[in-house]
Image: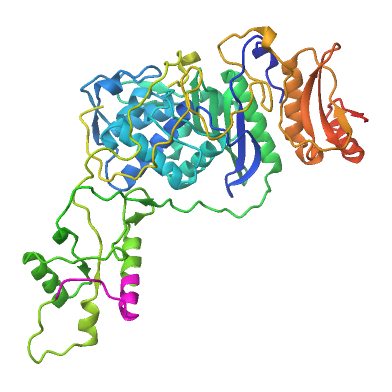
Amino acid sequence: MILFAWAIPMSVAAAPFAAYVMDARTGNEIYSQNANTRLHPASLTKMMTLYMAFNAIERGQVRLDSKFLVSSHAAAQPPSRLGLRAGQRIELRYLIRAAAVKSANDAATAIGENIAGSEQKFAAQMTAMAKALGMNNTQFRNANGLTAEGHYSTAHDMSVLGRRLFYDYPQYYNIFSRRSADAGIATVSSTNKRFLDSYEGADGIKTGYTRAAGFNLTASAKRGSKRIIATVLGGNSTAHRNAVMAQLLDAGFGKAPTRAREVKPAPPELIVAEPRKVVRRADQVARVQPSAPAQAQAQAQAQAGSTVQLSASDRPVARASTAGVVTPAAISAAVSRAQAAVRDGETLAASSRPIRKPGATVTASTKGSEDLLATARPTSRPEGDVAGADALLESDRPTPAPRSDDAASPQPQASLFMLQAPAPQAQDAQPAPRMALTEAPAPAPRQDAIILTSLDPVDPADTAATHVVSRNGGARGYGISLGLYTSQVAAQNALLKAELQESGALGAASGSVANTRRGFEPGFTGMSRETAELACGRLGARQQDCTVVGP
């Protein structure tokens, strides 16, 4: 498929570009370019907002028919919007539909505020969940993806999140393939309708757009036994972004094996933050196995106000397969570990027990029933904000996206669980919009990136020779030329297409576009003669002009 060269004005600057393609069945990488560079995710952020909402539903914190109160802050969010009003109450199911299908910023903010109590705390929980999912280059500052300082992610991390949505919440995943949905106060249309309709097998997932981010898309498609998930960050238009995504998915289906053992991701583990307020130890007494004598003893201790003191090493830490939930399986496993510890001679530090009646004998069954399992059961929320929930520093708001593509607090409702968030990281200021995308070097505007466009014109005199498809060049002196093109964009597209189709034959060759008097000449260098001849032969079979260039 040829990219839409006519849609790319040469006089405008490029948004940083990144791409990542994975085999969804295994999570293995198929293709990457600047995949770990921290960039603006825009409304791809809402994938995590929805992941957190699905998680809250499954652990019983909220229900689909729970009515969420809309705050003035949520109602004031810029487009794309559902049109919520401050003080309005609306069911969670409608907010999910609006955030997933229309990419409504007001709906996403309302979800976060009602689940966590404030958008700041919700963003901290989102970041903690990202770390638990293995998204190590992601940090959130809001629930909707509008540009904010310290709010960033990567093409790799967003692909990981897309895979998690598919595997962790299959019962909700179909929302991402809907072309329209009833959002309660309005019927909303999908921002991803064009791609879903044009690409065979596509069934999601999420679009995103801001001026700072460009046009973003995380997509999933299935053909036969294969499922491919890919992310594009920094497209210059909806059409161009969709065309690049189609090429990436095509390459993914071509390279992924027909048969592969499905490796489902393991459930994430999150540590539930312990309350900061001191609680009575009587509220954390050890629980006993079902046995009448032992139960009576524990009840007597609780009524008498006795406590069970746990040493630092024995103090339990609540862990869960999803955020802030202790599953029956986890409890059962903890019981088994406690029983094994007692059998091996380990003891829990505890207060003295009532003296046995004279003449009473200890039987094996009685001893087993009196083995205590210490389970901390917090009875109050932490006081104050979760770590990392510092005030949001908002940058200039992006202009509305074309076709209302996504650029995209009630009275605070106390969340049932507060997640530990990573310590705030110092961020360096960056040109407008003010964002701190440090700790991972961003690609140079005219080097090692596909040059796309944003909406801000630049001086054509600043345009330099562009390098695309970053590779480690070798010392060998042969290369290949893919012909001459009248426009730089067409040359770049030919280079990208060749790299995607024949990455194996090209090996470690370095790709670039040369601006010559005769035209723009894409090609690869740093190859041996044998490698160059092989690559040209394979590209020629695909009707691509190719010439071996000697040293």
Q: Residue at x 64, y 37 (%)?
A: 32
Q: Is residue 330 visible?
A: yes
User: Which residue is nearer to you in this view: 172 or 327?
Assistant: 327
Q: Position of residue 231 (x, y in %)?
A: 57, 33
Residue 336 vs 58, above or below: the answer is below
- Report the residue at 85% width, 37% height from top: 527
Q: Position of residue 3 (x, y in %)?
A: 69, 21
Q: Position of residue 183 (x, y in %)?
A: 34, 26
Q: Is residue 144 magenta?
A: no
User: In the image, what residue occupies the spot 45% across and 13% down?
Assistant: 399
User: Would residue 260 appear left or right of 152 to someone viewing this image?
Assistant: right
**Which is nearer the eye, 55 or 465?**
465
Q: As displayed, is residue 130 above or below residue 259?
A: above
Name the image quarter holding residue 314.
bottom left
What range is drawn magenta here?
337-352
x, y (%) of residue 430? 50, 22
Picture quadrant where residue 342 is located = bottom left
Instruction: Look at 55% across and 33% down and name the residue there.
Output: 219
Q: Residue furthest bottom?
A: 359
Which scheme is used to colour this image of the protein?
rainbow
Q: How many marks?
A: 0
Residue 226 in the figure: left or right of residue 480: left
- Between residues 134 and 501, which one lies in front from this camera angle? 134
Q: Quadrant of the N terminus?
A: top right
Q: Quadrant of the C terminus?
A: top right
Name the quadrant containing residue 54: top left
Q: Is residue 10 visible?
A: no
| Above or below: residue 269 compared with residue 184 | below
